[in-house]
Image (cartoon, helix red, strand yellow):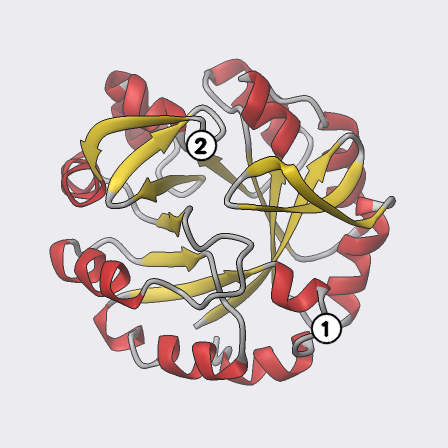
Amino acid sequence: MLIIPAIDIKDKKCVRLVRGDPQFETVYSTEPVFQAKYWEREGAKRLHIVDLDGAFEGKTKNLDIIQRIVEEVNIMVEVGGGIRDNRIIRALKNRGVHKIVIGTAAVENRKFIKNLCKSEPDSIIIAIDAHDGFVVKKGWKEVTDKRAVDLVKELEEYGVQEVIYTDVNRDGTLEGPNYDSIETMLTVTEIPIIVSGGVSSLDDLRRLAQYEKDGLRGVIIGKALYEGIFKLSEALKFDKG
């Protein structure tokens, strides 16, 4: 099970929100590049970077910081936030980003996703963010009428190779993951899933590790690491990759 630290960038800072709400923002570092290097030194094999400004505005805003992170670390970097066309995908790949995370476009532009699955199958990750089981988009500001379980079935038909599933009700809350929804997602698809949202303890990681046999590929951790609830080195004991 991959253990993936999160770096959320907003106003050039490394922050965490609660349920995606910018009114509940905590700044943990004014140097996202330093934070990325720190997680690498602590043993991370992969970083999950979200351009929150891009997610809210619909276009990537922090290419300069993202490029510096890719240049400064020697581990895999995946980036999401406002990525909705081929132009920004090319820009990110030209800067050395390994994996591109696409959310809103997966709901709004199925043809775009189908074409990416043909041309960039190894580079694309689809983010399914859900509120009470329904997919949300545009920086989690809009709830759609599409159920997460239905979307993931469609993505499987397109050839999507990896999905990040986030329960937005748990994100940044330290309330623990929504195990019921995770189990449901793993049941309805063969796509390997990385989960995000709510991890609050090593016991959460121990329980999530039991789902590896069912297709859980990894877990993204944010607030629990930044708050020092446990160390990355402790979490990495569950990373057998």
The residue tagged with tag 2: helix, strand or loop? loop
Residue placed at 67% from the left, 74% from the top? 232
Residue plotted at (80% across, 46% down) = 32
Picture coordinates of residue 216, whole percent (x, y): 32, 66
Q: Is residue 207 above or below residue 38?
A: below
In the rendered view of the protein, which quadrant contains the N terminus? bottom left
Q: Residues within 10 Å of mark 2 (few under 14, many from 20)?
A: many
Placement of 8 over or under 61, stated as above or below: below
The answer to whether mark 2 and mark 1 are in CB contact below 8 A is no
Residue 21 location (% of width, % of height):
56, 37
Using the image as rendered, state which of residue 212 and residue 73 is in the foreground.
212
Q: Residue at x 25, y 25 (%)?
A: 114
Q: Which residue is mark 2?
A: 140
Work out whether 199 lies above or below 87. Answer: below
Q: Amino acid at mark 2?
A: Trp
* Residue drawn at x 71%, y 63% as measured from the top left: 226
Q: Which residue is mark 1?
A: 228
191 up-or-down from 1: above or below = above
**Left or right of residue 105, residue 198 in this image:** right
